[in-house]
Amino acid sequence: MEKRLTKRIIIALTGIVLIGGIGAAAATQHWFQKGDKQGQNLPVTDIEQQIANNAGVPIALSAVGDVTVTPVKMSARGVDVASEFLVTAKHKMTAAELSAGLFIENEGGFKLTNHDPSKNEFLLTFKHPLENNTIYHMAYNEEGKRPLSFAFQTESAFGVERTTPSDRAFAAPIAGGIEIVLNEQIKGDFKDYFQIEPHVEGTFANVGNTYTFIPKQLIDDSTYTVTIKSGLTAVTGETMDKDYQFSFKTKWKEASETQYETDKPYETFLSGDDVFVDMHVSDKFINNTYDVDIYQLQTPESYMSCYDPDTKTVTIPANTPLLETMRTKSVNPKGETGLSGTQYVSLGKPLPVGYYVIDVKTELDGKTYSAKKCIQSTDLSVYSVSLEGETCFWIHDTKTGAAAEGALLDMDGKTGKTDQNGSTILKNLTEGQSTVTIR
């Protein structure tokens, strides 16, 4: 029987890992694909000034020191995708000898230049452009010695670095500004590329790379979508090639109003754990009794499609069987009241492995209130760690305690398969919130 787990995770691409040394002067160069032994002489340009321009950017030297590698052109955003690299050997060797021991992950061939033989310096250039916002690994393996490893991250493309409120933020304040932090300053007027729906009047402010929209008035309990339009141009000349969009929901109405909704649309529980629904409600509902209808979905696809992100609503698909109805009270462990009091409506028991929609209903002043949530129950447990565009997953079966070998992961088209330890790594991930599907 196929097991499938879907889990919301955040992937954040941060950090730049660089390695270095300093060099100068120009000589002759050789083209090398891995294993090549021949080359042709070609002229190269002077790179002294480019390396000097890197002053102030942290560079970590090789711990062993037999070989050091320095990006020629880089910034605080990372290594330029067209940058050459200065490779310095501690001992005298030829370009062919260095090439034979050099391995570079995710590249399509490189050329080595005898840059300054008196200093054992070589110039390394990739034959094909590198990709933005990507980690590349180098290794140098010399017979009789432990391999040396290096890593560098290419600079991210020009665009939005972060926003406040963040995408899908809940209970955002209606006072204050909407802040967009770019990774470069821009040419032109930011307001020409800013759009908010529903439309709100306001003013703009700018400090460095931070651009702030100060709305005249946001409305309580409302969803806003902000679009930073493509065509926005940095002072470097780079242009955003596609729109950047994020949404947020403002805080609830005052406690005198009736606020009644679930915290988030999806939740995952292990099959041995009691299921509960976390609710955001106003004080009027705190001591209410709740009727809970449990509907069982038949397929993973129906589970993923029962929530509409545009309308922010959960819908029970037609002909979905009603599994059970129960009556329960809520629990308020933190004693929260007022604007965003949190209540936990517990089923008091686990649910079998499968997919469900839970409809929590209650009565107030002759009116029925309903809030729905998508629940999945699974035997699989997932742990993940994200760093610099890569995420490592560990998956195991909580029933048997064994690693889930052979599980297939899909995250926005990036796929992987777990090994005998139940682990796999997905690389070159994009920043933002994503859905991971595990079979």
Image (cartoon, rainbow, N blue to C red):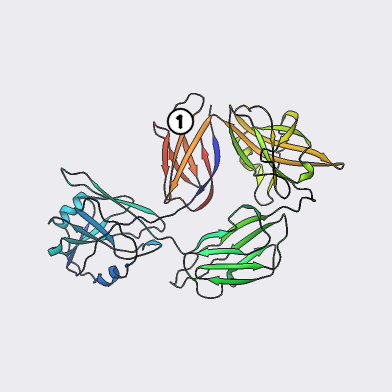
Secondary structure found at label 1 = loop
Is residue 435 at least partly visible in the picture?
yes
Quadrant for residue 152, please give it: bottom left
377 vs 86: above or below: above
Q: For this rendering, which residue is in front, 433 or 29? A: 433
Can you give x and y, in whole percent of width and height, for residue 376 in the image? 61, 34
Q: Quadrant of residue 113?
A: bottom left
Left or right: 437 as drawn, with respect to 121: right
Across and down, in percent, residue 149 comes to: 27, 49
Between 244 and 287, the residue placed more toward the observer is: 287
Give the vertical position of 324 relative to 35 (above or below): above
Which residue does the image show at 86% across and 43% down from the upper left? 365
Evaluate whether residue 36 shows in this view. Answer: no
What is the number of callouts on the image?
A: 1
In the image, residue 70 sits, relative to residue 394, either above or below, namely below
In the shown orientation, is residue 377 left or right of residue 281?
left
From the top left corner, tell me how far across and down residue 225 is, in percent: 64, 59
Residue sitting at x 74%, y 37%: 360
* Percent of width and height locating residue 67: 21, 54
Q: Is residue 389 left or right of residue 342?
A: left
Which image quarter: residue 23? bottom left
Residue at 28 percent of width and 63 percent of height: 84
Q: Which residue is mark 1?
A: 404
Q: Residues within 10 Å of mark 1 (few under 14, many from 20)?
A: many
Specify the farthest residue to the top: 400
